[in-house]
């Protein structure tokens, strides 16, 4: 390997580490070290990424590199269409080390197993021992989570969440949860009336860097899914901070009450639309939670909203990341329910007569966004009921959402939504008939199917698919205590009724 350079360390900064506070930059020396950032084909193509997701990541990376240069760092930035680009992170690291004669490599650990193992393999072959620093943007380290999880019979988010509340002292007064309880979820299940108005995420006008990226994405990835323009996501920390301010001021007060609601034509409702900014480093999870807590302490937002929002971040987000790392590798291959059907084409174009699915998928194609209940109870629920192969479902979610990185997507899909891990952390499958969707949305009013009809022509497909799912998986699920009532109801049904459900579901699935 080449020796002696004017640069001390090569600091590799990956596309989801766009924070000046990232561990490797805190330790680096801006006078002596050189930063490498690279847009590489391997990362752009390991999933069939939505065009908006690609544009968001590349533009945010380019803006971040500019900021670092302005702050006095030396940055080597390799664009996707640079003719010398090797197409892989390892390739670009090796090229930089060799061309610049640097012998020491430093980076913050990669967030995904795939990248971690690729870099480890490369370093061994190259004969280098990089200095790899833990990603301390997370509140709970991998090791802490592993200690918490070891020896527990059940991994429950709620137990973990309480410990993180104590650790961070968020929404705590004198060691006790504010408002006298840990969780206000029972107040967070209202249907949204049609007359509500929503501010939605604060739009950002694309600047010349984003314009250049939009042109690149259209040119290099013309066949990828999704609508590229108008593009209005934040791509800098400043704009992401403004999006956070806007959310806290205008949407957080109603976030909790309507957290599970869905409305035709409304993609965002009172959701924050901050996940991609948090996941890619523009915002820190803790600062987002502190901003929400401050709104409660100053009386600007009620406790059910603020606690509900904070739980998603210091509870679910941290928990999901912990699960990923204790279960990888192999977690994404789980198929507990032996689901083998192919993902229907309408997941890629939204062309279905089922209004709820059409709404969730169309807005996904438009914005690279859907909120949690759409992901869990519409697209996820349908895929599980229909017995779609979880690997294909996993690939779809990883592709279509701007916030999708495997560490957060996979446990949400394989575990929470598809129950393909057999219940590592979900107490039962999130399976529901059309009744749930009708209760939480207005989609059914405008659907070619009738949610009140259970079987036969015109019946809502979720109704028969639900019972078909229950029946099909009797052997695997009948022992689940939380499904006891469901199986009792099924067994009390007449054979004629049971057969009507199974036949209706069978007819529907044959035509999928
Ligand atoms: P809000 O509703 O405003 O919630 C606030 C924040 O809480 C989010 O920004 C996010 O950071 C965090 N959060 C909420 N729920 C979760 C969760 N279950 N896991 C992790 N963080 C959570 N989230 C991703 O960030 N990337 C994914 O690829 C992803 N895939 C998902 C797939 C499925 C099947 C399901 C059911 C959920 C998935 N989620 C994923 C979690 C959640 O749906 C999104 O974080 C959320 O919809 C993002 O929108 P928002 O920022 O408006 O969130
Ligand atoms: Fe969805 Fe069924 Fe309602 Fe149609 S009737 S919107 S398919 S739940």
Image (tube, rainbow, N blue to C red):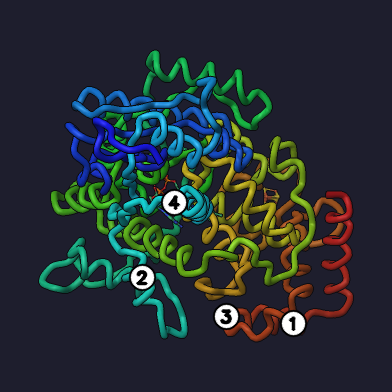
> x and y percent of residue 194 in the render?
49, 40
User: Mark 2 or mark 1: which comes first in sequence?
Assistant: 2
User: Mark 2 or mark 3: which comes first in sequence?
Assistant: 2
- The residue under label 3 is 482
Quarter of the picture holding the N terminus: top left
Identify the residue at image location x=57%, y=58%. Answer: 413
In the displayed structure, 493 sits above or below 326; it is: below
> x and y percent of residue 299 in the render?
16, 50
Crowdedness of circle 3 by 10 Å Cα count: few (<14), some, many (20+)? few
Q: Nearer the viewer, mark 2 or mark 3?
A: 2
Please report contact status of discs 4 and 3: CB closer than 8 Å, yes or no.
no
- Seen from the viewer's position, the closer of residues 12 and 20 is 12
User: Mark 3 or mark 1: which comes first in sequence?
Assistant: 1
- The residue under label 4 is 127
* Mark 4, secondary structure of its residue: loop
* Mark 3, secondary structure of its residue: helix
In three-dimensional space, the C-alpha distance between marks 1 and 4, rounded to whole angstroms, equals 51 Å
In three-dimensional space, the C-alpha distance between marks 4 and 3, rounded to whole angstroms, equals 53 Å
């Amino acid at each position: 390997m080449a020796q002696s350079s004017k640069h001390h360390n090569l600091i590799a900064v990956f596309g989801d580490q766009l924070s000046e506070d990232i561990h490797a930059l805190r330790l680096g020396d801006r006078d002596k070290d050189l930063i490498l950032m690279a847009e590489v084909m391997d990362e752009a193509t390991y999933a069939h990424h939505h065009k908006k997701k690609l544009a968001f990541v590349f533009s945010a990376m380019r803006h971040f590199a500019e900021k670092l240069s302005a702050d006095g760092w030396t940055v080597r930035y390799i664009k996707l269409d640079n003719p010398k680009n090797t197409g892989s992170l390892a390739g670009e690291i090796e090229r930089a080390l060799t061309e610049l004669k640097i012998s020491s490599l430093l980076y913050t650990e990669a967030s995904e197993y795939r990248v971690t193992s690729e870099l480890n393999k490369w370093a061994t072959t190259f004969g280098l021992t990089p200095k790899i620093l833990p990603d301390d943007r997370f509140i709970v380290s991998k090791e802490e989570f592993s200690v918490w999880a070891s020896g527990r019979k059940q991994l429950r988010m709620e137990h973990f969440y309480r410990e993180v509340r104590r650790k961070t002292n968020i929404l705590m007064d004198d060691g006790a949860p504010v408002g006298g309880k840990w969780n206000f979820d029972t107040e967070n299940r209202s249907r949204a009336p049609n007359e509500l108005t929503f501010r939605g995420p604060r739009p950002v006008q694309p600047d010349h860097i984003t314009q250049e990226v939009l042109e690149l994405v259209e040119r290099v990835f013309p066949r990828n899914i999704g609508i590229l323009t108008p593009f209005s996501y934040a791509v800098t920390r400043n704009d992401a901070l403004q999006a956070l301010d806007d959310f806290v001021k205008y949407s957080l007060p109603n976030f909790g009450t309507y957290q599970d609601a869905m409305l035709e034509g409304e993609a965002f409702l009172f959701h924050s639309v901050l996940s991609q900014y948090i996941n890619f480093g523009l915002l820190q999870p803790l600062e987002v939670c502190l901003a929400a807590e401050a709104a409660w302490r100053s009386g600007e937002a009620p406790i059910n909203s603020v606690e509900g929002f904070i739980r998603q971040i210091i509870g679910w987000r941290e928990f999901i990341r912990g699960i990923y790392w204790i279960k990888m590798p192999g977690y994404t291959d789980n198929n507990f329910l032996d689901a083998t059907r192919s993902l229907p084409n309408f997941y890629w174009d939204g062309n279905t007569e089922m209004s709820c699915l059409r709404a969730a998928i169309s807005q996904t194609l438009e914005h690279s966004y859907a909120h949690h209940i759409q992901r869990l109870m519409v697209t996820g629920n349908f895929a599980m009921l229909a017995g779609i192969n979880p690997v294909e479902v996993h690939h779809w979610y990883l592709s279509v959402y701007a916030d999708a990185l495997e560490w957060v997507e996979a446990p949400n899909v394989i575990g929470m939504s598809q129950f393909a891990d057999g219940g590592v952390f979900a107490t039962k499958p999130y399976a529901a008939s059309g009744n749930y969707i009708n209760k939480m949305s207005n989609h059914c009013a405008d659907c070619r199917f009738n949610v009140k009809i259970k079987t036969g022509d015109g019946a809502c497909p979720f109704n028969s698919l639900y019972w078909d799912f229950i029946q099909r998986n009797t052997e695997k699920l009948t022992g689940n205590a939380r499904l006891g009532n469901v199986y009792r109801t099924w067994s009390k049904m007449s054979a004629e009724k049971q057969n009507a459900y199974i036949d209706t579901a069978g007819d529907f699935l044959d035509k999928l």
